[in-house]
Structures are given as structure tokens and as C-alpha cells.
Amino acid sequence: MVVRAPIEIRRYLARMDTDQLGHLYTDTLVIGGGVAGLRASLEAAKAGSVLVLVKDQLTESNTYHAQGGIAAVLLPDDTFESHIDDTLRTGCGLCRPEVVELVVKQAPDHIRQLLEWSTPFDMVNGQIQTGREGGHSHTRIAHALGDATGKAVAQCLIKQVKKQRAIKVFEECFCMDLLTRNGECLGVICYHPRHGWQCIWARRTILASGGAGRLWRETTNPVGATADGLAMAYRAGAILTDLEFMQFHPTTLYIAGASRTLITEALRGAGACLVNNKSERFMSQYHEQGDLAPRDVVSRAIYDQLAHTDATHVYLDVRHLGVHFLAEHFPTISALCQSFDIDVAEDLIPVRPSAHYMVGGVKTDIQGRTNIINLYCCGEAAATGLHGSNRLASNSLLEGMVFGKICGETVAREIAGQPGRLERHRIVFEVDESKRTKLDIPDVTNSLRAVMWRNAGIVRNGQRLEETIEIIDFWQRYIMDKVFDDPVSWQCQNMLTICRLIARAALQRQESRGVHYRSDYPQPEDDKFKHHIDISLK
């Protein structure tokens, strides 16, 4: 099913005449510096020049901050079939089976590649130590540096990228829009604080811009995860899909006034348990797997507990695991607790759910192609069909590696057959000056995130979603009509665009499935909604 945008979206956010801007040329342009973008760049560099654009620093991706591990069949008692079944079951009927099989079967090879590149996986007797997380029927999660797997993987890939003379990385570079002509992606227009506006022309563009967690007030994501890539792709005519499926991580540290910090699911895999404000374990009431139930189940269970106890949070009980065990296996969490004077030997850890992972994104085929010629997408920005309506724990870094490599390989093959000089094109875009009142951008951004948390969060209903759309429409009338000259404002425009699409898709899906839960439609409706909701401008 395709949902058309009911409001007009300006093609480009800013006025421009490309003949008046600086120009750079590259064979492959990669937008994003997480696991997917870095892995793609390594493959694409085998056939030509690569330019990687990063919105912030390379250390500010969702990948770099990921505590959880990488799911892969590594032990003799585990099987590909089991990993596939776990992924399909968690996806609640919307996974693409051929994609699931592809990713699961390639997982061990990617782990071995990371080992060859000296990723410091946690080892026991010369073998990778594996743990268990929610939704998995076997012990198959590989970790590195205890609870800093994403950081270890990112550092490994960054080191490999820096070895390649064909790859250049531009940090603190804000991509404004994809440049297109006749349905073909030609590159991007971007802004750098030191170099100003630039057009970057590329034979192929790979969008790996990451997630959207910052659209919600409570989130585990770093500040850059504001769905800019999704908004760019949407304005360019790409098909977005599954936007109603935002995964909320059940356990983030809840300290009033402090930013939310992830408490990895692996902690529950190691034996930690959830308790309410009466110190009662409650997860067995909601799922047969108890504390290791899929994330959507655990998040809703906590939401239910908070509603019935009028509390702001529940707790993780780790006291029985021991201080030394936590310090050895979860050093990041141990240090985090110490910084807030939480004694893990005596105290419970206060936690509550937060927006974590965007399951939906730009629709791609099994090669990472989008509906726009020469535009590819991978990682959290993409909707490959692996996750269905709910991502299985620790399948995300895996997906980024697999599809990053696939996109890079495909682009390299195509570029190899296209010798010759890369052309540039003149694109002129004008915007009339708005006479409407200006709104305060930071105020709107904060209010938008609060509305999304209240009305399009863990539990939704039709009336609240309709109200959300009305509120966003009001803000859009006074913000989307303006031409701004700073990244904070462009980011707000992108957030408004994607928040409205999320609310629209959530309103359209009149059922509960995976991470999307409607209190007014609490059951899945396979006859009506066992399909994807696509959204596009065309």
C-alpha cells in the first residue's frame, strides 16, 4: 500500500544556483560514517574514489555508541535455521524471508573479517565468547570490549578506511539535499562551516545516514540522529516504508534531568531482572521468555507497570551478579552507575524505555538499490525487509555490515564499467520570501519531540495521532515556508517532515504489530494489514 503525501513539500530546502557554488567530484559518495557507510566505502574504493560525508564526528554515530553485540551463528549447537526463525518470529509477518536468509548466512563471515581486522572481540579459550539477548533461542551474540561493541567495530572500520588512499572523509558536513535530474541522483548539495556551500557530484551515492531516535524526547540516540537522510530522500522522490515501526529500547538509565543512556539488553542476558517499585519481578506476567522477551513486549510491559503504579521508572536488579562480574563484562555500565552514585552491589538501577532504532526507512531491493537511479541505501536509514515490524536484538550492526558491503560491491561493479569524465549540471531553485511569522526553532524542536513521545510513542491511538498531525501541520505552515541559513533550522525542517510521515503511517495502520501498538486496535489484523505501508511524494 502506498500513502501519498497530503501536503506539498518543497523540493529543495534552500535557494540555489549550482553554477555559483563550489564543486567536488567523486566516483562514489557515501553519506554517513557508521558501520554501514564505512563498510560500503571500503568496497566502493576498490573501483575508484570515495568521499564520505559525516554530519558530526566519526565518533558520533549510532554505531559508535552501540553497547549491544552482533548476532551470528558461531557455536556448534546453533543453526542458521534457528537464527532465521528467531528473526522471522520477532518481525511478526513483515520480514522478507530471502533477505533474512541472506543476512543470517553471511554473519559468520563478517565476524571473521572483523577478527582479521583486529576487532577486540571478547574471547574465551581462543574462541569468541557469546551471550544471549531477548528474542534469541540460542547463545549467539558476539561482544567486544564488554558492553562497547559498536565502539570497537567503528574504531576497526575507521582504521581500515584511513588506510585507503582512495577514501576521503569530510566531518561536520551537513547534507542539505540530494541533487537529482529526471529521476537520477547526481550527488548532493552540502554545507560545511569552514568551506560553505558545495555541490558534490558522484557517479553513485550511498545513503547511510543512520537513525531517527532524536525525533522523540526520550531516546538512546546521539544528537545527530534526526532523520535528515530520510527527509532528503523523500524530497528527492524516494519511497519510504515502515515508518510506523520505531523500536523503543526497554532499558535506559532514568535519572531526572540527565540525558538517557542505554543499559544494554545483554545485561538481562547475563541474569539481570526487571522489578517494579515494589521490588516485584513482573515480566513473567507478560511473556513466556520473561526478562528476555522481545523488546516491544518488554517496553510495553514497563509502560503498563508505570501506568498502574504511577511511577516514572522501574528498576534493573543486578545485585546478585556481583560488582567484579559487572566491572569485567559491562565496564561502561559500571562506570556509568558510579558516575551517578549508584552502588550496583546494593542499589537497583532505575530504567525506562526510550526511542532506539528506526525499523523503517528508504525502501531498497536486495542489492540496496532505491527507486531513484544511482541512489543506494544501507544501515538504519534503509528498509531492507530484514526486521519486519520489530528488529531482533543485535541484528542491526550485522545488517549494516552485510548491506554496506553489498552496496559497496554493487557500486564498484557499476563504476568499473563507466570510464570518462564526470559531468556537472546546472540546477536552479528559487523560493519566494515568506511573509508569515517566524517561530522559535529550538522551542518547536523541543515541543515536537515531546508531542512525538506522548502521542506516537510506545502506545498510540487514532485520536492522538490525528492531533499530532494537526499540530505538526501548524508548525509546518510557519517553518517549512522559510529559507534558513543554519543546520539547526534545516534539521528542524527535516524532523517536521519525517514526524508527520511517521504519524500518518501509524494512523493508517489500524492494528497492533511488532513495535507498533494501537490501544484502539490492540490485535494484529493480517487480512487488512499484513503488508508494508509505502510513502512517497509521487
Image (spheres, rainbow, N blue to C red):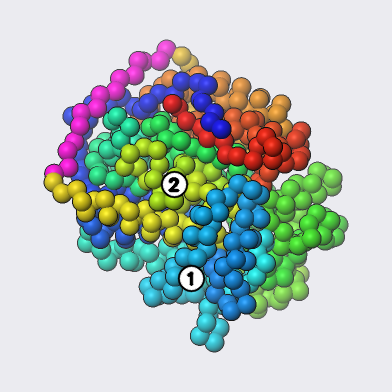
229 is higher (above) or lower (below) than 5: below
Which quadrant, please, contains the C terminus? top left
Residue 376 or residue 339, whichever sits in front? 376
Q: Is residue 79 left or right of residue 34?
A: right
Q: Is residue 502 magenta?
A: no
Q: Residues within 10 Å of mark 1 (few under 14, many from 20)?
A: some
Secondary structure mostly seen in the magenta stretch = loop
What numbered label is drawn on residue 176? none
Residues drawn in magenta: 421-435
The x, y position of residue 338, in whole percent, is 63, 66
> At 39% from the left edge and 45% from the top edge, which residue is drawn?
369
- What's under tag 2, amino acid-wise? Asp
- What's under tag 1, amino acid-wise? Pro
Q: Residues within 10 Å of mark 2 (few under 14, many from 20)?
A: some
Instruction: Place residue 395 in its image quadrant.
Output: bottom right
The x, y position of residue 455, in whole percent, is 67, 34
Q: Is residue 321 left or right of residue 395?
A: right
> At 35% from the left edge and 47% from the top edge, which residue is drawn?
206
What numbered label is drawn on residue 365? 2
1 is higher (above) or lower (below) than 476: below
Q: Is residue 200 left or right of residue 219?
A: left
Q: Between tags 2 and 1, which lies in front?
A: 2
Which quadrant, please, contains the N terminus? top right
Residue occupied by mark 1: 108
Q: Is residue 430 magenta?
A: yes
